[in-house]
Image (cartoon, rainbow, N blue to C red):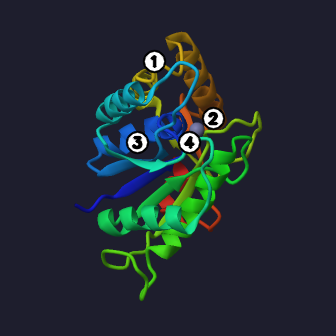
Amino acid sequence: MKIDFLCIGAHPDDCEIAMGGTIAYLSSKGYKGMILDLTNGEPTPRGNPEKRIQEAKKAAEILSVERITLDLKNRFLFDSIEARFKVASIIRKYKPDVIFCHLEIDAHPDHVQAYNISYASRFYSKLTKVNLEGDVWYSKKIFRFFSNHLRINMTPSFVVDISDFISRKIDACKAYESQFSDFQVEEYVKTFARYWGLLARTQYAEPFYSHEILKVDPRFLFE
Ligand SMILES: [Zn+2]
């Protein structure tokens, strides 16, 4: 099954927090998406592996995307050949045109490693004469999202207007009952999305970052 976009997070809930609105938006337009968790996110103070899997499943259903959770080690995630091969195999199998991943600057070491693994795997997936299943594939674009343990402000390359999808984003984040209280999630998601929305002259938005130059359709200049 080919997909259109792949969101790679270190832990279940990272992709939802960073870009749950954009995922819901893309799904509603018919784009096929998948969330790939590199670890199961456990242990955490109030979670357990079984509960976390159920929460992640529910969140993916709310956002209408597939989900795969790899068995790399939470808290000790590391950019390794093994990790790159696992992710590159997924990329070759599902052939996403666009990949979303973590930023390279973060207080959480797993997030930084996830960034490195994602970029390396995008490249590995196009290698020939390597012990990887499936046909070679190179995703056209890779963007970084903001799900960050650093309290920093990074100017995005662009934002996506998620004004019509804020409720679904909140619902998807609330699925992680073991991680957040409902009030905590709603306040954080709304405040953060409102900040970027305000700067982009809309209600709610999510920021994204690109290392590469982006081109836009000229009609967007007038929106
Ligand atoms: Zn995380």
Dots 2 and 4: beta carbons under 8 Å?
Answer: no
> Mark 4 or mark 3, which has the lower sequence index?
3
Q: Is residue 66 above or below residue 172?
A: below
The amino acid marked with disc number 4 is Asn
Q: Ligand 1 is located in which of the four quadrants?
A: top right
| Residue in the image at 32% along x and 28% along y | 58
Of label 2 and label 4, which has the lower sequence position?
A: 4
Residue 18 location, x and y as percent? Answer: 54, 38
Q: Are marks 1 and 3 in contact (CB under 8 Å)?
A: no
Which kind of residue does numbered mark 2 sit on? Trp
SS under mark 4: loop
Residue 202 horizontal/vertical position (percent)? 55, 33
**Disc 3 designates what residue?**
23
The disc placed on residue 177 is 1
Amino acid type, mark 1: Glu
Viewer-side residue, 98 vs 41: 41
Which residue corresponds to the image point at 69% horizontal and 46% vertical from the top-left? Answer: 109
Residue 88 is left or right of residue 194, and the answer is: left
Residue beneath label 2, please? 196
Residues packed near mark 3 inside 10 Å, few (<14), some (14 to 19) or many (20 plus): many
Q: Quick one: quadrant of the N terminus? A: bottom left
Q: Which numbered disc, 2 or 1, marks the residue closer to the eye?
A: 1
Q: Earlier in the sequence, mark 4 or mark 1?
A: 4
Mark nearer the N terminus (2 vs 3): 3
Under mark 3, the amino acid is: Ile
Mark 1 crowd level (few <14, some 14–19, many ≥20, 10 Å Cα): some
Q: Of residues 48 and 146, which is closer to you in this image?
A: 48
Q: Position of residue 12 (x, y in %)?
A: 47, 37
Callout 2 secondary element: helix
Query: Mark 2 or 1 closer to N-term?
Result: 1
